[in-house]
Amino acid sequence: MKQMKKRWMMLLPTVLLMALAFSTTVFAAEEEAEYVPALHATFWALVPAVVAIGLALITKEVYSSLFVGILMGALLYSGFQFERTVTHIFVDGIIGVLSDSYNVGILVFLVILGAMVSLMNKAGGSAAFGQFAAGKIKNRVGAQLATILLGVLIFIDDYFNCLTVGSVMRPVTDKFKVSRAKLAYLIDATAAPVCIIAPISSWAAAVTGFVEGEDGFSIFIRAIPYNFYAILTIVMMVGMVLMKTEFGKMKTHEQNAQKGDLYTTPGRPYENVKEEKISTKGGVADLLIPIISLIICCVIGMIYTGGFFEGADFVTAFSNSDASLGLTLGSFFGLVITIVLYQIRRVLSFKDCMDCIPEGFRAMVPAILILTFAWTLKAMTDSLGADLYVAGLVESSAGAFLNFLPAIIFVVGCLLAFATGTSWGTFGILIPIVVAVFQNSNPQLMIISISACMAGAVCGDHCSPISDTTIMASAGAQCEHVNHVTTQLPYAVMAAAISFVTYIVAGFAQSAWIALPVGIVLMVAALFVIRNISGSLEEK
């Protein structure tokens, strides 16, 4: 009995310590859960992103600018407390975003895609296609139109679009002296703008998921004719190529490219990239088969995650798909098929194929680093309540400016996506608000406003230097990132301005048959004015 009592006396302090530690942990967790920053859901929530973007455009240093924005967000969140600032940056920020399965899936997809690009290049598939295309394409206009066409055809996902179109068309555009900045613009303008009007795409799946209480896919289809920014961007891109005219910094890049300088500025990280030893056995099939396999596998991967093989129909499966997991699975099997193909055709040895995997990873490191910082910056703005602040602005303007609301929503979407670098996050914030405002009062205006949400998000994403799609376009074109942003911005702003006017027309007419032709006429007229002012690139 004494021995039992002695044991209990020895265990008692341990039990008390454990209880104290547990209670401290619980109270700390509750305190942390209840913590709300003093500047929550105010204008200050957007300041970190504005600081990061401003510094990136001024200093031309993307990594340091993003980190300063992250630090600013953490300081505002913590009330300038050192410990909370540090833990917010690393625990809630960098480690948090890299612990998210969706983000990790995107990174894995990028690495595999980088490996496939390296494989296709080393096998000689890209070079063979370039030679084939060079025989069919006779001039700069043809090279740019072929890039646009390929970008439109690859509508499954914007990441896949950026890297695939870049790797395939880069040798062709280089041959016809198209600047890397112009190639990056063509890639970027056929990525998100095409995906957002393609019913079978990861973007369509994302949008339908945000339309609660309605048939999301049906609404997406009905909203396509009202997605003025996407449609007008394509009209503008094709028009400028056919008219052979440019303006702003892009014109300088294109003029220098015709003289042999594809980069123009001192910042040219891809100029002296070490060329890999390319197989002479490769043919066009060594490019086309991997790309077609990748597209098919990615589609299968996405509908698999949406329950297609468990009984769901194709449209439902695509709407419910997990784009990150689906693209990861699809790209993995696409990689396996590519390696097996090259072994059967004896284009590359198995060792050469394995060497391409770390090569592809290294090629994606800059993009992965920028993506990580961009996601972390978004986590900072989220913790400051940027979504609540913007939602309040939109709701407060709903009553007074009903017919102007599509145009207002378009501008708000542009600013939010530009500041946060995410279009999908912008969808998630604005679309539920629009549905709640118009669901029972004006269904037609709800469709137009949802489309304005999507168009504004794509526009802001298109302009933002911290957007993942913009980053991928720079990587795909092997163009210095700030060069891509600064040359593309005037083009995106012009398309946005005309889209804004078109949404005003749509708000009153509430018909795509009236508003869309007005927008197209305005865009064509603007292009003719620009051509008369700046002239043709071929004029000396």
Image (cartoon, rainbow, N blue to C red):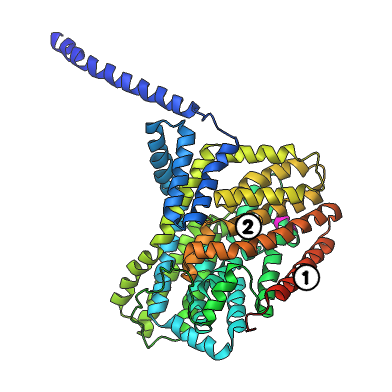
Q: Which amino acid does the dot numbered 2 rest on? A: Val
Would residue 276 be counted in the magenta stretch?
Answer: no
Characterize the magenta stretch by its predominant secondary structure: helix
Residue 182, horizontal then vertical, whole percent: 56, 72
Question: Pointer 1: what residue?
Answer: 525
Look at 65% across and 77% down and name the residue there: 241
Element under disc 2: helix
Query: How many discs mark residues in the rendered view?
Result: 2
Residue 516 visible? The answer is yes
- The residue positioned farthest toward the bottom in the image shown: 135
Q: Is residue 198 above or below residue 378?
A: below
Residue 528, horizontal then vertical, whole percent: 75, 74
Quarter residue 7 falls in:
top left
Question: Is 147 or 522 nearer to us in this picture?
Answer: 522
Residue 524, horizontal then vertical, whole percent: 76, 71
Which range of residues does the magenta coloring cover? 219-223
Residue 269, horizontal then vertical, whole percent: 41, 68
Q: Which amino acid does the dot numbered 1 rest on? A: Ala
Quarter residue 223 falls in:
bottom right
Question: Pointer 2: what residue?
Answer: 458
Element under disc 1: helix
Badge 1 local density, few (<14 within 10 Å), some, or many (20+)? few
For the C terminus, give its image quadrant. bottom right
- The residue positioned farthest toward the left in the image shown: 3
Badge 2 local density, few (<14 within 10 Å), some, or many (20+)? many
Look at 76% across and 53% down and name the residue there: 448
* Residues under numbered marks 1 and 2 in contact, where contact means CB atoms less than 8 Å apart: no
Q: Earlier in the sequence, mark 1 or mark 2?
A: 2
Q: Is residue 336 above or below residue 221?
A: below
